[in-house]
Image (spheres, rainbow, N blue to C red):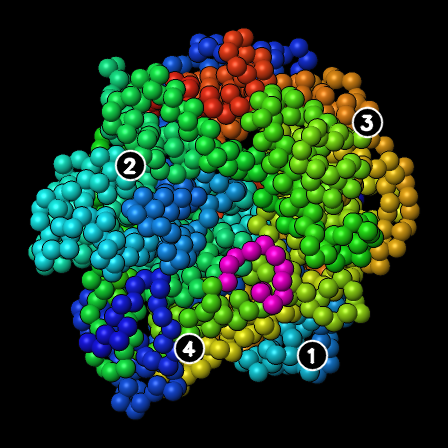
Amino acid sequence: VNQKTATLVPGVVQRKSSRRIFLRGAGGVLLALPFLPSLFSSSARAQAVAQPRRFICLKSFSTQLIKQWYPTFSGNGYALKDSKYSGSKADGTTLLTAPLGGGPYTQAPLRDFETANGISGILGPKLNPLLDKLTLIRGLDFLPSVNHNFGGLLGNFSSCTNATPCDADSLADVPTIDQVLAYSPKFYPDTPPLRQLHISQGVVDAMSYTDRGQVGGEVQQMTARTNPRDVFNDLFAGVTVGEGEEPPAPNPDRLLVDHVIEQYRAVQKSPRLSGDDKQKLEQHVNLLAELEARLSTVPQLSCVLPAEPESLENNTGTDPADIAAKWDLFLDLVVAALACDRTRIVTIGVHKALGPGPDPNDSTLVGHYHSEDASGGTWHGLAHDWGNENSRRMLAGINKWIAEEVFGKLVEKLDVPEVEGSTLLDSSLVYWGNELGFNHIAHSVPCLLAGSAGGYLETGRYLDYIDWDNQAFFSQEDGNVIRGIPHNQFLVTVLQAMGLSPEDYERDGQAGYGSTSTSGRDPSLWPVDYDLSQVGSVLPGIGA
Amino acid sequence: VCAALLACSLLCLTGCKTTVGEEGASNAMGGAPGTSGPVGGDTPGGVEVQCDSSVAGVTPLTKLSTVQYRNTVRDLVKRLGLDEVPTEIDALLASIPDDSTGQVFRGLDDRVSTEHVQGYFNVGVALGDALQNDAALLEEVAGACATAATLSDDCAKGFLESFLLLAFRRPPSAAELDEFSALNDGVRSPAQAIRAMVIVALSSPRFVYHVEIDGREDDDDASLLEVDPFELANRLSYTFWQTMPDEALLASAADGSLATPDGYGEQLERVFEDDRSSATLWQFWKEWLLLEKFTGFETTRPAFQSLTYGEGFGESGHDHYADMVEEVRELTALFTFEQKGTLAELLTTNLSVTSSEDLARIYGVEPYSGSGPYPTLPEGERAGLLQRAALLASNLEQTNPFHRGALVRRNILCDALPRPDPNSLPPGSLDPPPLDEEQTTRERFAAKVESALCQECHATFSDIGYVLESFDAIGRYRTVERVYDETNGELLAELPIDVAGDVSIASKNEAPVEGPLEMNQRIVESGKVDACFAKNYFEYATRRTATTGSLDACAVRALAEVTSGDAESGDSGLFTAFQSIARYPGFFQRKVGAQ
């Protein structure tokens, strides 16, 4: 065993930038599958196995400007919706005509809208090279009545967050779909080093809610890592680095975890603990079991260990240099995590971004922060001020920056060969979702995907799931409410794209995933008559 | 449809059941178990106290809060003989997730995540490595016998008895000694064995949780435990210090003196007088008054710059919000520890304790020089704690009367005020009314919520915010409102303000108030703020909510009495109230919940 870094302990890994890491599992089997192009060898390629699927979710917050998100392109055979509709339906976006999925829905190739300025106000030109691998979706509606939320885009539509605890009328928390995947033996045939990675800046609470794989157990909101050094340590601490092919021994400290678990079992036996107390300890034991698995490592691949980043403390400030530096570090770590197969699930809460300042004549980008309790920060204030043209300009600028500098950069970094003929991106599904649609309305929540999930999706398209012949309920600047398609069908699409079947995720005999309750919505103001007969099906026409 | 889409309100909601209460309800706060009645006098809203039990509410198993965990590790390291906490361990401690302020108090966030468990383990490894890799330190901690070729049973036992007494905050049981001794398996070297013991101990439930299962059972109720002396020592130290018991506390538990009234009183006094107690109480004020949630002044906005012209906002060397918060710290400490005043006195004081020139200028007073009498606030402008700048500050150049009113109604008076549900409302309901140079903020906000639907809730708190319009976005007193153009900061208008309001603090039948001074007096005289303070301090200190009908409710009632100075006998005031949480009978009990 090469023990050049044998003194490594979790949390204090030293950087070895150009070396390769070797991870060995309990079975002692080493799969020699190099990842990055620089490490490819012909013999290794010959041993290539099927790529695992990965799920990466980015989330942005508050008001989204519909006209800025979607093409407003005319010409080249396209006209605006205004040519066919009047009133709020004439919203200045492009009218699609090609049918989609046999329903009243429509689609178009994204390349048809490519211009030097990108395909829309927010989806700027830096995404142009990637258009063939993107999928833009319009018309995903959250059916339950929600305001600010953390887990809606991943299926937990409750209003319960750590900032806003549940009230009596709230839906019960359910696990978000990333957690359904995280504990699925189909998604993870073996215990992974890390079931998921949650990243954020500023806000610590993640979009993810978990029952830790215990169906019916308590559901808790998870927390995110906010310091790149912590992310690095989570992913690569304790990973031994070597230069030869000889695999290292498992971390001997894994044996100590058994002793710790025994202590929990001993306390758990006490009759002087309530059922809730014991459940709490049981959850802790589950986390210890995962810790043990991480220390034991699993049969994995070799890849390049990323540079250990400097420690950048979390803060609630808006320093542009701090924000940009952290995103750059986070994105590199995410790519390394997926390439090294340290985890296959990543969520990224984009609570901070750069964007234009208040002076329209000053092109200098400033920092923006969408805080957890939504009580302050420029971003949320701008979102509420959507009626103001200057605020809309700034909001669009923030989201364009996210599109190009967070989403776009991540996708670009992932689009490198993993095995012959397929990139890391091709095996993945990168999902940029949002908290809400326009204003505080969870209708037509914008959605942009990248990757085909191993060929599951037919990419390169703009899919519109609104039947524009339906009633328009109301409109505001940059948005209107016309019945689209339940977001639940998008959740089903993701779950099935990741390899799960309905029996793996459906609960209590209900088809699909997530609540479909429109309780509390006034039918004179909101569409409530959704066709739920297909709620357990994937989005029509989305498959390859 | 469009007619239904008229704007509603920023904090409006349907189904709001909040009312301010009926005239004539009792304000009585009887103290002894067996009595009942609403504290604050009004239902619904305020603090409900049904106090008719001699049994404490269920005490759930809780982890050490992240603050407690970090403090405990640092203290443990030092008690083991290290002069300083190694930077490596400090870095690992920082990686443990902070508890959330979502439920007002961080201590109520009892989640344990992957990051916690990994972090606990990593810290154990780092401390174990520190011992293993430093022979001198190892010898100091475990004795010279630990440097022998093999670790004898006696040597291992001696180390475990002293180490686990600190780590578990009580002497280890015989079974625990056996379990840990098994790590000295003859394969590990002595240093490796001790390292392994440290790692396991620092991830043990006895280290990372408050395990209280060793007390004596009540004769009639097996689920009711009298906490044993070591558990009591832990309750004292974690309640007031947020860390492990010191040597004297552990010794008093070991020799039995802590179980005697005199011995307990002596330790309580000693613990409470320690600086760590004042730090803990300051954290309470910060969390209760939401001082950690302010996200900063928007100093780059042209209108904000116009509003604060000449005040130094956003300039190097100036941190106005830090000054504002520091003033609250100094003021609460003054009335708690030095003047030993009541909450009412704190809430009505006109003393200015700030030494910040920036903040003093905002108030129109001289900075406090650090000695001699404190300056007093300009007469007729503001009063007490609640009208200090830290509680009035807005991010933007405009005030938000709804946020200010809701803070008072919800956090200071403890009246129920549900969060708005915009999906039950027409679109735009949550958007602030647009700027209008012909209307004051009050007029704009009032117009937004004039419908009967909005008034269901807004009638209970909007006027409180309107009265506070006497103070601008940085907490400066004013009689006119200056309206600035948001994009270029140009002064558009100067409008006279109306600060009278039907604030209905204790009753909806109250006469309106003429301004903030009268409203403050109404708040103080309602008694609701004492009850609300008591409820909040109970939750902060015990990390649970008081169970209706339990001894906890009696404690909240008694705390309110002591706080307000109404107690018939004995001391009263904030100092006594803070300390008295450790004197109520429930502090000595643990009630186990349903199996």
Q: Are marks 2 and 3 on the same chain?
A: yes
Is A313 magenta? The answer is: yes
Which quadrant is the C terminus of chain B positioned in? top left
Query: Which residue is tagged 1?
Result: A117
Q: What residue lies at 9% left-to-right and 58% top-to-bottom?
A: B149
Circle 3 packing at 10 Å, graded few (<14), some (14-19), many (20+), is: few
A519 versus A411 height, above or below: above
Q: Give the residues drawn in magenta, as a range.
A: A312-323
Magenta stretch secondary structure, dominant:
loop
A303 versus B543 height, above or below: below
Mark number displayed over residue A424: 4
Query: Which residue is tagged 3?
Result: B380
Chain to which mark 1 belongs:
A
Q: Secondary structure at mark 4?
A: loop
Q: CA distance from mark 1 to mark 4?
A: 27 Å
Q: Secondary structure at mark 1?
A: loop
Q: Are marks 2 and 4 on the same chain?
A: no
Amino acid on which disc 1 is placed: Asn
x then y, percent, for residue B102: 52, 42
Query: Which residue is tagged 2?
Result: B169
Disc on the earlier residue, 2 or 3: 2
x then y, percent, for residue A17: 39, 78
